[in-house]
């Protein structure tokens, strides 16, 4: 196909209303008449166009029926529009800035050149041009529509405005809801407070111990009560009869975009592609974006050597001082084509029907349900004791605690993967806080503050459980550090948080965040109570017997709730054989104290440091036998 740049147009182009041209059906028939589209697939293409919220280009290209260049040529011929090549003939960056670089990418729209008194606007979605024509005319004056390849539009914008897009990704969330202004305490100001604290500790160690122990016991009682309430709510819901019925019939299925951030994952690329390719959602409605940091040459090389199916593409995140998962997600968000945005991790193996379940659930629920959280499980639970405990912990969290909190009407700290958002709500919240290392938990709280709801959806994603104590501590320290930062950010204005959440949800947030931080950080104080059982010296040895009995009952109740939650969570999984290991969680959670100390220490010097968890040590049972560059062809075949 020859490309004739529009710079050769006469400068005497007269201002006119842009011709919008035919519908997709006419394009299909034009392609069939020219022999570009096989006549045998024309009826199927017409049916898909009627039943899907998919662009014609996505339907034809994802199924390999038409080459992108042939489709672009057909659109140009029928719409009497000219084709431009932004790669060979770059656009005017000043025109891009007026429309917005991120908006150009999101809408496949490129204000390209000014020719005479007319601005030439290239689009990859001519069927949507009329929606923006009035705004374009108001901004630029008379405009004329041209056509361009969507990937070429994205590349052209990135060449000129990558730095601006990267800065946008880092500052998308407003200051009042972001932690990017977090600063370590000034040593000159902190020193007097430290000296006073040391003086009080030396002067009255028993008093300091008593105050800290009292606070630790209060948070233990609060977290136990909240966990028991969630357990009760979930058990009560299980006794209710299931509502019979078939999945809803959706007239036009929506497009779903999935963001998969990758960083130093060269060994997992082929397996990841094969796992995602098993999703049974229509291929023309799947939009998988593999987000790779520009400096990550190993992962980029692995993906370049892998045959990507048409519904997958790579988005390269420009370099910058900040390298976090939420920054990559923010950067890639404008590239998404779907009205539903999902997030997977590199090692994820989702259920094949997961996207279908998510779409049906969003269809059933109202617009206030802006987020669906899938359940996480592990495909290597029996590697060692650590992975067994990790599996038990996640079973309790995703099958008891989170659904129980939802049933109680409380905010939930989201997980970092198997998350699905209504795009409109996600953009209204302005994405993720790029500086928060637990951007998922923070976003769950921001959803609640802005009047949205998050719910769980009954679908599983298998992940790789961390099997080494060092890696576990690194991962958990990042989570706990993020919990501290998230709590501090949202408590900048406690009264405002109270008004936005209401009293019940406000206190639930205190227990979920501040209570969790306290329990891990001050856990050694609770361990010291073992000294009482053996008659050894302890600051609380002189307490009245009723108080000691109450303390014992609290410890027993906490342990009973933990064990019950673990057992009930496991009972809802395929890992029931791990039930004998549930009591050993008492030896597992002390690792969290080490992680908490590490996380608090990093808050001083490296609050935004992302301590990455390595993946790829274990594989799922149904992974392809070879981790070579090309996943099986059958896995990429679609419907």
Image (cartoon, rainbow, N blue to C red):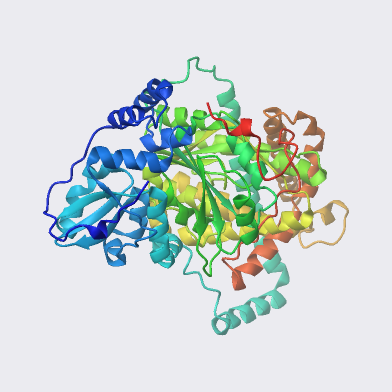
What is the x, y in percent for residue 113? 25, 61
Against 180, residue 66 (above or below) is above
Is 274 left, or right, of 10 in this rendering?
right
Is 488 left, or right, of 544 in this rendering?
left
All told, the count of numbered labels is: 0
Is 195 in front, or is 81? 81
Q: Residue furthest top?
A: 244
What is the x, y in percent for residue 99? 28, 58
User: Is residue 436 in view from this perspective?
Assistant: yes
Is 271 in front, or is 502? 271
Residue at the image position 75 percent from the left and 37 percent from the top: 625
What is the x, y in percent for residue 527? 78, 55
Is 39 in front, or is 630? 39
User: Is residue 55 in view from this perspective?
Assistant: no
Residue at the image position 48 percent from the left and 66 percent from the top: 180
Residue at the image position 15 percent from the left and 62 percent from the top: 116
Q: Residue furthest bottom?
A: 188
What is the x, y in percent for residue 169? 44, 60
Is 345 in front, or is 38? 38
Is 502 left, or right, of 518 in this rendering?
left
């Amino acid at each position: 196909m020859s490309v004739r740049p529009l710079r050769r147009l006469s400068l005497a182009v007269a201002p006119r209303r842009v011709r919008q041209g035919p519908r997709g059906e006419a394009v299909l028939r034009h392609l069939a008449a020219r022999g570009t589209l096989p006549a045998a697939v024309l009826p199927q293409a017409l049916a898909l166009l009627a039943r899907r919220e998919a662009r014609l280009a996505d339907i034809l290209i994802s199924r390999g029926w038409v080459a992108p260049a042939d489709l672009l040529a057909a659109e140009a011929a029928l719409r009497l529009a000219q084709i431009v090549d932004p790669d060979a003939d770059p656009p005017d960056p000043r025109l891009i800035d007026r429309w917005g670089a991120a908006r150009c990418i999101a809408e496949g729209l490129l204000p390209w050149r000014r020719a005479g008194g007319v601005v030439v606007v290239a689009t990859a979605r001519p069927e949507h041009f009329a929606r923006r024509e009035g705004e374009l005319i108001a901004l630029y004056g008379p405009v004329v529509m041209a056509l361009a390849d969507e990937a070429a539009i994205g590349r052209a914008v990135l060449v000129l405005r990558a730095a601006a897009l990267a800065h946008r990704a880092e500052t998308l969330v407003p200051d009042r809801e972001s932690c990017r202004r977090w600063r370590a305490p000034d040593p000159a100001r902190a020193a007097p407070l430290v000296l006073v604290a040391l003086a009080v500790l030396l002067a009255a160690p028993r008093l300091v111990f008593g105050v800290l122990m009292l606070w630790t016991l209060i948070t233990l009682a609060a977290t136990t009560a909240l966990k028991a309430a969630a357990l009760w709510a979930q058990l009560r819901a299980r006794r209710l009869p299931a509502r019979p019925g078939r999945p809803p019939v959706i007239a036009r299925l929506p497009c779903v975009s999935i963001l998969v951030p990758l960083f130093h994952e060269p060994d997992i690329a082929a397996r990841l592609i094969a796992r995602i390719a098993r999703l049974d959602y229509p291929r023309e409605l799947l939009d998988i974006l593999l987000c790779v940091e520009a400096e990550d040459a190993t992962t980029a090389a692995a993906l370049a050597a892998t045959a990507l199916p048409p519904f997958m593409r790579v988005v390269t995140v420009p370099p910058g001082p900040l390298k976090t998962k939420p920054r990559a997600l923010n950067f890639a968000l404008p590239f998404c084509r779907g009205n539903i945005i999902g997030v997977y991790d590199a090692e994820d193996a989702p259920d094949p029907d997961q996207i279908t379940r998510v779409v049906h659930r969003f269809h059933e629920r109202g617009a206030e349900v802006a987020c669906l959280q899938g359940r996480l499980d592990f495909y290597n639970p029996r590697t060692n004791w650590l992975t067994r405990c990790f599996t038990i912990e996640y079973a309790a969290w995703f099958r008891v605690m989170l659904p129980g909190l939802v049933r109680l009407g409380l905010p939930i700290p989201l997980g970092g993967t198997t998350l699905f958002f209504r795009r409109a709500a996600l953009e209204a919240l302005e994405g993720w806080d790029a500086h928060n290392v637990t951007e998922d938990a923070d976003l769950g709280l921001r959803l609640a503050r802005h009047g949205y709801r998050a719910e769980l959806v009954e679908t599983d994603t298998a992940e790789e459980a961390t099997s080494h104590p060092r890696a576990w501590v690194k991962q958990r320290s990042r989570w706990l550090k993020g919990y501290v930062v998230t709590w501090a950010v949202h408590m900048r204005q406690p009264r405002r948080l109270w008004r936005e959440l209401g009293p019940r949800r406000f206190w639930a947030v205190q227990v979920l965040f501040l209570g969790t931080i306290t329990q891990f950080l001050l856990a050694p104080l609770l361990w010291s109570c073992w000294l009482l059982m053996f008659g050894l010296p302890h600051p609380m040895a002189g307490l009245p017997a009723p108080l000691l009995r109450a303390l014992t009952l609290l410890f027993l109740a906490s342990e009973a709730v933990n064990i019950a939650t673990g057992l009930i969570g496991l009972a809802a999984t395929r890992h029931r054989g791990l039930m004998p290991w549930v009591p050993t969680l008492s030896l597992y959670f002390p690792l969290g104290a080490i992680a908490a100390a590490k996380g608090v220490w990093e808050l001083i010097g490296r609050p935004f440091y992302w301590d990455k968890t390595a993946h790829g040590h274990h594989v799922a049972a149904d992974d392809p036998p070879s981790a070579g560059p090309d996943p099986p062809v059958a896995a990429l075949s679609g419907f």
